[in-house]
Image (cartoon, grey):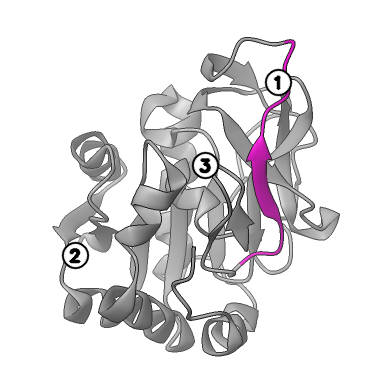
Amino acid sequence: MSARAVVIDAGIGNLGNVVRALGAVGAVAEVTREAEVVAGARCLVLPGVGAFAAAREGVVGEMEAALRGALAEGAWLLGLCVGYQLLFEASEEDGVTEGLGLLPGRVTRLPDGVPWPQIGWNRLHGVARDGAEGAAGFMAGVDEGAWVYFVHGYAPEGVPEEMVLARATHGRSFPAVAGRGRVVGTQFHPERSGAVGLRLLGNFVAMAHGDGGGADEPAAVAATGSGENSR
C-alpha cells in the first residue's frame, strides 16, 4: 500500500507541484483544509509561498489545534519555504508576526548587498550526516554542496546548531534545513529541486511511516508551545 501524506492547504502554497513530487516518491497525497483530516494524519506537509503573515492566517484556530494534536499523537511535519518559516517563533516580515514556535529562532530579512529576494539555485553546506535532535535520516543521500532551488527574501536565524541540518549562504549563512524530533523543514522548494528534493521528500515520507525514527520532543512542544494568534 502506498504511503499517505496530508498536504495542509493554508491558502498559500505550490500545492500542485508538491502533490506531484510526493507522488513521484510513492506517496498518495491528499490536500486538505479540514482540521479533522489534519488531526488524524501521520505524515503532514505544510507548504507556503508569499508573505509570512498571510500564510500564518491559514494555520490558526481549529487548524492549529489539529496540527498540534496530531504532533502530540506521533505525527511528522515537514514545512516547505514559508511553511518552514512558520515553524519558528516569529517573523519580522512586515512587522512581527508570531509563528508556531515548534522550532526556536526568528525569521529575518536577508541582508542588503546581494540580489533580493533570492530566486534560483544555491548550494547546501554543513550538511548533517546523522540528522539533528531526532530528525535522523532526513538528509540521507544528500551530499555537501548539493544544489537546491530557493525563492525567498527572509530566512531563520538564532536556530541552535544542534537543530541545523544544512545551511546555505546568500548575504549571510542561514539554516536551509532545520529539524527537531518529528518536525523538520526546508527554506528551499524540494518540489523544484530535482533529484535532491525528491530524495528529501522520499526520506521524510519513509521516516513518517516508520522507516527511520525521531525523538518524541515535538509532542511536548506541540502541547506547551504558543497557541496564541497575536501578530
Q: Is residue 161 left or right of residue 176?
A: right
In the picture, the disc for residue 201 is none
Q: Position of residue 192 (x, y in %)?
A: 38, 26
By secondary structure, the bulk of the magenta-drawn segment is best described as loop
Determine which residue is flagged by label 3: 94
> How far separated are the C-alphas under marks 1 and 3?
21 Å
Tell whether label 3 touches label 2 (CB within 8 Å): no
**Other residues around mark 2 within 10 Å, as few (<14) / some (14–19) / many (≥20):** few
Q: Earlier in the sequence, mark 2 or mark 3?
A: 2
Residue at left offset 58%, top offset 16%:
116
**Other residues around mark 3 within 10 Å, as few (<14) / some (14–19) / many (≥20):** few
Residue at left offset 62%, top offset 45%:
139
Q: Amino acid at mark 2?
A: Met
Tell whether label 3 touches label 1 (CB within 8 Å): no
In this rendering, which labeled residue sits more in front, label 1 or label 3? Answer: 3
Q: Position of residue 101 (x, y in %)?
A: 59, 69
Residue at left offset 17%, top offset 64%:
33
**Other residues around mark 1 within 10 Å, as few (<14) / some (14–19) / many (≥20):** some
Determine which residue is flagged by label 1: 170
Determine which residue is flagged by label 2: 1
In terms of depth relative to the viewer, which is nearer, 8 or 115? 115
Q: Earlier in the sequence, mark 1 or mark 3?
A: 3
> How far separated are the C-alphas under marks 2 and 3?
45 Å
> How far separated are the C-alphas under marks 2 and 1?
41 Å
9 within the magenta span: no
Which element carries disc 3, helix, strand or loop? loop
Q: Is residue 74 left or right of residue 220?
A: left
Above or below for 196 versus 201: above
For the record, the magenta segment spans 103-113
